[in-house]
């Protein structure tokens, strides 16, 4: 058995290529059944997301070129010429294919290293293959092992720990300052797309109250409704400031909307409880001098960007440790796979029987007298085919036990014929 | 006794190494090893202290050797409480190495023979007075550590430059809470500890105040932490200023603990 993976991803192919190769979820199952013929390709799985299209197969050993050819034909279907994508295609066999899948599932191969979505996508691809009946004993093992690796990577490295998008920074800062955002209050001043996205992340992280202030009250009301928040009066911003633990500001104003005096007053009313300000507007709407006040933290767009950059670097450092985990898991997977592979056991068994026949022939050779080379070859062939014919039913049984991963039976066969591990 | 203490040291060293590695590598599996080792160390340590008491006939908090060992024991106990309440494991990467060092010094310190030790033990005030104060020191050490953690993170948040340490420390709110509650516990222990000391002193020679360096430092320490708590509760000094006070307070604690010993006086022992 052999594991072969062919595909394109965001590094190897431009979107123009990826979009032509992509499979819709509905098309996936039917395509899989078409690809898996039970002869050359025995199992198959398609991972098709915006960043990658990959076909993972389990095939007969030693027939990599045939398999690759089949998959390329399969990918080209009828409407995509193979020249169009063949140069972008990567091909992985066995260890290399296993490594690739492990890296994809652990989000080491993602556009943004450590983003967890890809694991869900692999999970989805697997369940489609299961429904289509094209995921069998090898892919089952492989995919489950990949999930395990992804989990290990997530818990043992900090690969997904730090925010790598500006909109998520509000949540991360909130956790650093307040430990948890549960029950905290956020104030949204103005309405930009980024501010709205940040607010949505905050609500998902547990912020219980969202106030929205906008120069146009109806607009504030609309936005507030989308988070179940409340619209507040823009002119009374100073009062609401004292109630807000998190302030996100993004208006089109060309001067400070939140001044140091306002912040100082709010700090006093808050009895020095900490709060932080995120200013996504250009020109800035929050006086940077507020950052000098005790227990108040101000982040403008440049600060956020530099933190995001350093977080990405931190993730990349963690990714190096994740690669080590992947390597050690590949070895473990190969070991568990070996138990599935009937090939070596059958080979050894057949060899043992052939050796017996050859030895017996040699022992009696003298009694046979003078033989022509043709006669000698004929006797050898006779012995060989007799041995093969007699052992055939036994070997098919053995192969069947392996295919069914019936450990007890495999063990029994091994004992019976004195096969070593 | 020495061999038991060596076993204690071994357990704490294992705990310390794993805690530090876990802090650096952010690996939870290492933390589990660290906590098991610490638990084993703590049980052995408790046994060692009880055995000491039974063997030498005085409360095991008289010689420097005993005091260091006892101090390490209170630190482990305090850290366990913090683990239970706040899961702030970052503290262990400092506390556990310190505990190991204290035990190591305790092992290599020679036990000096002293007849006073047994005579001291006749009053119940001796164990109460000393135990309370050592736990107060441990609490102030926790305040100090939490304050340092607060200051480090607050500085990075203000500068918007985050180092590796930033990502490994508990949140500002958590360290602030740890510092506040530990300071409150520490001051309570210190107050009762000083009061029992006065009671004991007056029972011995009728004087409540001996005016020796240790007492003066203790009084200063007490005032500083009372001030810290008052400020915190009035919310005027939240955050950085309170944290600086937690650091300054610990400097005084060190003076009380070691400085007074070097200067001599009424409090002759560790």
Image (cartoon, helix red, strand yellow):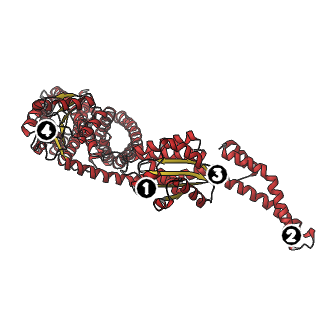
Identify the disc placed on residue A152: none
Left or right of residue B154, residue A335 in this image:
right
Same chain for mark 3 and mark 1? The answer is: yes
Instruction: Tell me whether marks 3 and 4 sit on the same chain.
Output: no
Residue to which mark 3 is pinned: A341
Q: Is residue A204 left or right of residue A256?
A: right
Q: Position of residue A231 (x, y in %)?
A: 19, 28
Quarter of the view holding residue B62: top left
3 or 4: mark nearer the eye:
3
Nearer the N terminus, badge 2 or badge 3?
A: 3
For marks 1 and 2, the one nearer the N-term is: 1
The one of B145 and A236 positioned closer to us in this rendering: A236
Taking depth in this image into account, of A221 and A196 the one nearest to the observer is A221
Mark drawn on residue A376: 2
User: Sequence order check: which comes first, mark 3 or mark 1?
Assistant: 1
Q: Are marks 2 and 3 in contact (CB under 8 Å)?
A: no
Task: Note whether residue B72 is visible.
Answer: yes
Q: Are marks 1 and 2 on the same chain?
A: yes
Q: Secondary structure at mark 3?
A: loop
How far apart, in angstroms, are the residues tagged by discs 3 and 4?
Answer: 76 Å
Spatial CA distance of label 1 from label 2 is 61 Å
Q: Which residue is mark 1?
A: A17
| Chain letter of disc 1 in the image | A
Label 2 is found on which chain of the structure? A
- The reply to whether callout 2 and callout 4 are in contact (CB within 8 Å) is no
| Chain under callout 4 | B
Q: Residues within 10 Å of mark 4 (few under 14, many from 20)?
A: some
Q: Which residue is mark 4?
A: B217
The residue most toward the front is: A79
Q: CA distance from mark 2 to mark 3?
A: 36 Å
In x, y percent, where is residue A374? 86, 71
How much space separates mark 4 and mark 1, taking CA atoms? 76 Å
């Amino acid at each position: 058995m052999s594991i072969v993976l062919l595909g394109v991803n965001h590094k190897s192919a431009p979107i123009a290529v990826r979009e032509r190769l992509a499979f819709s979820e509905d098309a996936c199952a039917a395509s899989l059944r078409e690809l898996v013929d039970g002869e050359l390709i025995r199992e198959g799985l398609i991972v098709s997301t915006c960043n990658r299209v990959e076909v993972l197969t389990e095939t007969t050993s030693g027939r990599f070129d045939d398999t690759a050819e089949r998959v390329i034909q399969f990918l080209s279907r009828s409407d995509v010429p193979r020249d169009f994508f063949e140069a972008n295609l990567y091909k992985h066999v066995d260890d290399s294919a296993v490594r690739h899948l492990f890296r994809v599932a652990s989000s080491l191969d993602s556009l943004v290293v450590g983003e967890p979505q890809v694991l869900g996508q692999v999970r989805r691809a697997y369940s489609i293959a299961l429904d289509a009946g094209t995921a069998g004993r090898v892919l089952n093992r492989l995919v489950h092992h990949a999930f395990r690796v992804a989990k290990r990577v997530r818990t043992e490295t900090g690969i997904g720990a730090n925010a790598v998008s500006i909109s998520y920074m509000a949540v991360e800062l909130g956790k650093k300052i307040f430990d948890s955002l549960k029950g905290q209050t956020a104030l949204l001043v103005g309405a930009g797309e980024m501010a709205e996205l940040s607010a949505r992340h905050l609500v998902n992280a547990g912020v219980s109250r969202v106030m929205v202030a906008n120069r146009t009250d109806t607009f504030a009301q609309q936005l507030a409704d989308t988070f179940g928040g409340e619209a507040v009066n823009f002119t009374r911003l100073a009062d609401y400031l004292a109630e807000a633990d998190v302030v996100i500001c993004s208006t089109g104003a060309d001067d400070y909307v939140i001044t140091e005096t306002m912040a100082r007053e709010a700090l006093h009313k808050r009895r020095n409880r900490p709060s932080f300000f995120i200013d996504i507007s250009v020109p800035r709407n929050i006086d940077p001098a507020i950052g000098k006040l005790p227990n108040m933290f101000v982040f403008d767009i440049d600060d956020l960007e530099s933190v995001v950059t350093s977080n990405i670097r931190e993730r990349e450092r963690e990714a190096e440790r994740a690669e080590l985990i992947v390597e050690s898991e590949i070895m473990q997977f190969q070991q568990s796979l070996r138990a599935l592979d009937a090939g070596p056991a059958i080979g050894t068994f057949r060899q043992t029987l052939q050796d017996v026949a050859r030895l017996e022939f040699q022992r009696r050779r003298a009694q046979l007298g003078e033989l022509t080379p043709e006669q000698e070859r004929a006797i050898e062939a006779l012995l060989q085919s007799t041995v093969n014919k007699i052992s055939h039913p036994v070997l098919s049984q053995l192969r069947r036990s392996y295919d069914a991963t019936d450990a007890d039976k495999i063990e029994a066969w091994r004992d019976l014929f004195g096969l070593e591990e | 006794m020495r061999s038991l203490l060596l076993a204690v040291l071994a357990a704490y060293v294992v705990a310390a190494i794993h805690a530090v590695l876990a802090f650096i590598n952010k690996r939870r599996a290492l933390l589990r090893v660290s906590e098991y080792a610490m638990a084993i160390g703590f049980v052995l340590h408790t046994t060692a202290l009880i055995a000491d008491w039974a063997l030498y006939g005085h409360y095991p908090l008289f010689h420097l050797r005993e005091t260091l060992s006892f101090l390490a024991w209170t630190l482990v106990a305090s850290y366990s409480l913090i683990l239970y309440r706040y899961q702030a494991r970052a503290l262990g990467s400092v506390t556990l190495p310190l505990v190991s060092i204290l035990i190591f010094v305790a092992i290599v310190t020679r036990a000096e023979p002293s007849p006073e030790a047994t005579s001291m033990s006749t009053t119940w005030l001796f164990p109460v007075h000393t135990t309370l104060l050592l736990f107060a020191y441990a609490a102030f050490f926790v305040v100090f550590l939490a304050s340092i953690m607060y200051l480090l993170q607050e500085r990075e948040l203000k500068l918007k430059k985050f180092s590796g340490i930033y990502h490994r420390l508990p949140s500002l709110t958590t360290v602030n809470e740890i510092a506040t509650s530990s300071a409150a516990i520490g001051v309570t222990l210190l107050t009762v500890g000083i009061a029992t000391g006065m009671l004991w002193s007056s029972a011995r020679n009728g004087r409540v105040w001996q005016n020796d360096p240790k007492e003066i430092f203790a009084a200063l320490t007490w005032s500083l932490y009372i001030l810290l708590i008052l400020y915190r509760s009035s919310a005027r000094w939240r955050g950085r200023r309170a944290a600086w006070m937690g650091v300054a307070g610990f400097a005084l604690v060190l003076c009380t603990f070691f400085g007074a010993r070097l200067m001599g006086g009424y409090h002759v022992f560790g």
